[in-house]
Amino acid sequence: MKKILHVCAEFYPLLKTGGLADVTGALPKAQIKLGDQVRVLIPGFPAIKAGIKNTNIVKNVDTYAGHVTLLFGYFEDIGVYIIDAPHLYDRPGSPYHDANQNDYSDNYLRFALLGWIASELACGLDYFWQPDLLHCHDWHAGLTCAYLNLKQSSHHAKSVFTIHNLAYHGSFNRYHLSQIQIPESYFNVNGLEYHGQISYLKAGLFYADHITAVSPTYAKEITTPELGNGFEGLLKTRSEQRRLSGILNGIDDEVWNPTSDSLIAARYSKRKLDIKKTDKYELQREFNLDVESNGPLFCVISRLTEQKGLDLILSLLPEILDRGGQFILLGSGDNKLQQAFSEFVNNPQYSNKIAVYFGYNEELSHRIIAGADVFMMPSRFEPCGLTQLYALKYGTLPLVRRTGGLADTVIDSTDENLDKKISTGFSFIDCNEDGLRYAVNRAFQLWQTQQVWRSLQRRAMSQQFSWQDSARKYQQLYYAISRKL
Ligand code: ADP
Ligand code: GLC
């Protein structure tokens, strides 16, 4: 049995901006079921403190980032360490930026402290619980690996750094080095230097004992110049040293399950698939879409960012709507994308055919996944993607670009794959309008034969992406790296 500490900045259901939270909320639960001792370390953001009220003080510590109190409490079965430092973390909204989307100017300090406390826990900060393995997520926790390296004579812990998204580097001015107590010698190509700055992501990539990406395909893609973000050289080397691998995310069955989901209008299963019609009808009514329409209802649930390829959807929307399709989007982020989608909604030509909801709405995301027919995710790159997994589970056929985790989880409905009875959705390769058109055409074509559509839905719903499998793979990895010197 191992003592594992997850170091992260989000945690479902208390604080979530994207899939990272889904992972840090679900993976510990699955690992506890496997018998490991698992805890989480997270900054004391307001939502975390409000969600875990019953805490004990582990220690009061004076740090380079001021006075902080380390708290410990339970969220369900998961033990959570909270870094209580109101001067750094007590800010409303996103954990990373203010209401105008500007990163907080002291982010270097806020997330350095997260890594520093994590490394102190490895060195015995909590007398009663000392982790053997620190599992660090994304750049927010990257500095943990550098601090562990710095303090290697004071602990025996190993580290795993998981890349959820290589596009966010956590880069800060080098003059902060001394403030965060990292020696100048670490500011090196063979260290945490990246283009003249300190990169917390690179600290994770360089100093971790092992790196994982959240899908096998993404683990390969990031060793190439196209998707390596400038880290491909380092990642290729680490891969050749067998220090980089891909482990796919899973689905939290307690949260995403059409047979038991209390947030949807009507619950259904593979055998009672007819009931899904009620979810579609209720969704159409809620958003004033034509309930008489016989066309497929396409949907998107996403952060509105360049990564997700939503501009491709914009260029194909007139065709989708003119062919009798409907479209609904739930998303928040980029203003230009919001405006572009709004123009369609305001165009009388498309009234009762398209609806958008800008903002973050967990409950609505369940109603949309249950009610729609096709789930669109034409991402430029996608480390794993969770929403397409939820869509599969709800029989809402995913239509995705074949990249990263999308390539690992969705099988295109080509004639050959249909014959072999292995297809589960639609996918395309070329990241342009024609690529997307190919997949959309295929969806419209198969929609004509509802019997085929049904069999696709059933196959999609039968796919297994359980956290138990992923947790087992992490467990094997932890044991393997503990044995390595
Ligand atoms: P990413 O982490 O890149 O955003 P994922 O597909 O891994 O992509 O995870 C996204 C998660 O965030 C899913 O749980 C999805 O349902 C949720 N999500 C994204 N946008 C919204 C939104 N506007 N409202 C509610 N949930 C959202
Ligand atoms: C990131 C990625 C997404 C992945 C999620 C959880 O936000 O963009 O593909 O599913 O992390 O690992």
Image (cartoon, helix red, strand yellow):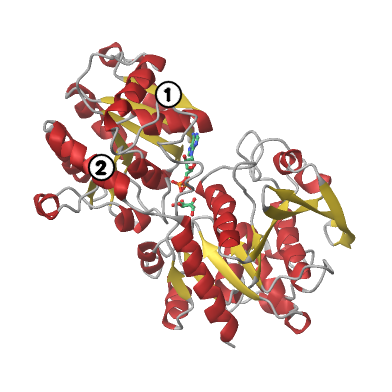
SS category of the residue bearing label 1: loop
Q: Is residue 403 left or right of residue 189?
A: left
Q: Could you say which is closer to the camera, residue 76 or residue 407?
A: 76
The amino acid sitting under disc 2 is: Arg
Residue 277 picture location, percent across and down: 29, 24
SS category of the residue bearing label 2: helix
Residue 199 in view (yes/no): no
Pointer 2 residue Cβ closer than 8 Å to ligand 1: no
Q: Could you say which is closer to the camera, residue 253 or residue 200?
A: 253
Query: Disc 2 versus disc 1: distance between alpha carbons?
Result: 20 Å
Q: Name above or below for residue 289 compared with residue 185.
A: above
Residue displayed at 11% across by 33% down: 449
Residue 144 in view (yes/no): yes
Which residue is disc 1 drawn over?
A: 265
Viewport quadrant of the C terminus: bottom right
Residue reaching furthest top? 348
Which residue is disc 2 drawn over?
A: 458
Q: Name above or below for residue 485 compared with residue 408.
A: below
Residue 68 picture location, percent across and down: 86, 54
The amino acid sitting under disc 1 is: Ala
